[in-house]
Image: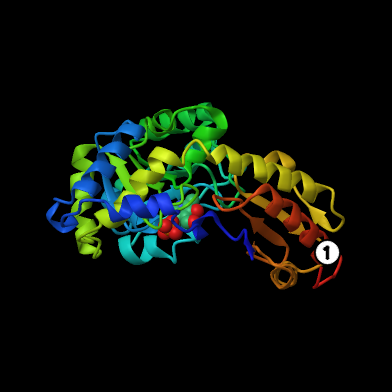
């Protein structure tokens, strides 16, 4: 099976497994796992922040950020199609008791004017009581739902300026921030500058078996550590897994350019196929989203699986394919042949 469902499906390579096997470990809940501490220091340095905290998943990282920045009944602004909003099982309302207010925009991003328009007007204390105070604004870069799109730095900086003027806290869901850096050459720390907190994931394109980190000021991370423990996130000899993440940071960031190249070849091939619609300009990194126009997307996905390619669907038209660490050039050409067959109604090659 050529598995293009997600970049989360990667298996640790032999070299990564060797690094994991050799890693010194301690007890993360006592704060003395040396490999976790090494990973946290490296991550904070890359992101230009005072501190970072290793956690099991990106969802936990984002949700710890929201819990630390807000109080129940607060409102959180997010961009269109934000993972925090639609992809984390309703955690913001369940865990933090906050209201998510989605903003409109392009390719997962929104501008300073849109943010300003969402802010409350001057009103009396009595009227104010009726509304959820907006405390936090969240961005996502690259943007999964929009197809791995990169938030242009200037647009992001203008939005952040507006958020600061309004006194809002800011969080970046940078699950795939590494991809933005590889695509543009702009260091992760430049994208992270101005945000109060950032989530990054090691378990996606970087190929580690699990883990994410939340970064920010030393005070913010210390505060978030209490919630990590409260959520059951003190995961003891976590250095076993952190070693995979350290290996991934050191060896797998630059090679993401290969995934981007294959995503582009895949997208260009798809653009030639009858029954497929794709916005080529929207394919900026490793995620390829396209529409199956004649065959309903769930049926298209089943046909592809029968012929040996796994993809993901989200509704009746949209399909997602994501090249990653284990996908070769030959896999991409075979996948294109299978997509062509599936779009024209075939279930076997
Ligand atoms: C943009 C984004 N943020 C957060 C997450 C959540 O990460 P995890 O699956 O590790 O909880 C994902 C997962 O795919 C994601 O794409």
Residue positioned 50% across, 35% down in the render:
254
Instruction: Write down the quadrant of residue 342 in the picture.
Output: bottom right
- The x, y position of residue 223, in whole percent, is 19, 48
Instruction: Write down the quadrant of residue 248 in the picture.
Output: top left
Residue 157 is at least partly visible in this image? yes
Residue positioned 32% across, 54% down in the render:
20
- The x, y position of residue 305, in whole percent, is 69, 70
- The x, y position of residue 259, in whole percent, is 59, 44
Picture layout, residue 297 above or below residue 281: below
Residue positioned 72% across, 54% down in the render:
290
Residue positioned 75% across, 71% down in the render:
303
**Circle 1 sits in a helix, a strand or a loop, which is it?**
helix
The quadrant in which the C terminus is found is bottom right
Horizontal relation, residue 65 to residue 330: left or right:
left
Horizontal relation, residue 55 to residue 174: left or right:
left
213 or 327, which is in the foreground?
327
The quadrant in which the N terminus is found is bottom right
């Amino acid at each position: 099976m050529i598995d293009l469902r997600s970049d989360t499906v990667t298996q640790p390579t032999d070299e990564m497994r060797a690094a994991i096997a050799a890693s010194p470990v301690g007890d993360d809940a006592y704060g003395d796992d040396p490999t976790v501490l090494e990973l946290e220091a490296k991550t904070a340095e890359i992101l230009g922040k005072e501190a970072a905290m290793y956690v099991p998943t990106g969802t936990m990282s984002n949700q710890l950020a929201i819990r630390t920045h807000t109080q129940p009944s607060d409102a959180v602004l997010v961009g269109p199609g934000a993972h925090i909003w639609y992809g984390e099982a309703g955690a913001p309302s369940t865990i933090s008791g906050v209201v998510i207010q989605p903003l409109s925009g392009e390719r997962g991003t929104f501008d300073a004017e849109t943010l300003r328009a969402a802010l409350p007007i001057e009103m009396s204390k009595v009227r104010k009581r009726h509304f959820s105070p907006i405390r936090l604004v969240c961005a996502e870069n690259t943007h999964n739902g929009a197809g791995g799109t990169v938030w242009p730095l200037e647009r992001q900086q203008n939005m952040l300026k507006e958020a600061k003027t309004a006194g809002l806290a800011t969080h970046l869901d940078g699950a795939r921030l590494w991809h933005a850096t590889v695509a543009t050459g702009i260091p992760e720390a430049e994208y992270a500058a101005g945000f109060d907190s950032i989530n990054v994931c090691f378990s996606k394109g970087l190929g580690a078996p699990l883990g994410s980190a939340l970064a920010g000021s030393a005070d913010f991370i210390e505060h978030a550590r209490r919630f990590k423990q409260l959520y059951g996130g003190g995961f003891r000899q976590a250095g076993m897994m952190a070693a995979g993440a350290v290996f991934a940071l050191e060896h797998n960031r630059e090679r993401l350019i290969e995934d981007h190249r294959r995503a582009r070849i895949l997208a260009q091939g798809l653009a030639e196929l009858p029954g497929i619609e794709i916005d080529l300009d929207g394919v900026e990194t490793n995620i390829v989203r396209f529409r199956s126009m004649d065959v309903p997307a769930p049926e298209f996905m089943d046909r592809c699986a029968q012929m040996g390619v796994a993809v993901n669907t989200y509704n009746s038209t949209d399909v997602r394919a994501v090249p990653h660490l284990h996908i070769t050039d030959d896999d991409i050409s075979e996948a294109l042949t299978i997509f062509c067959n599936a779009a024209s109604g075939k279930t076997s090659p």
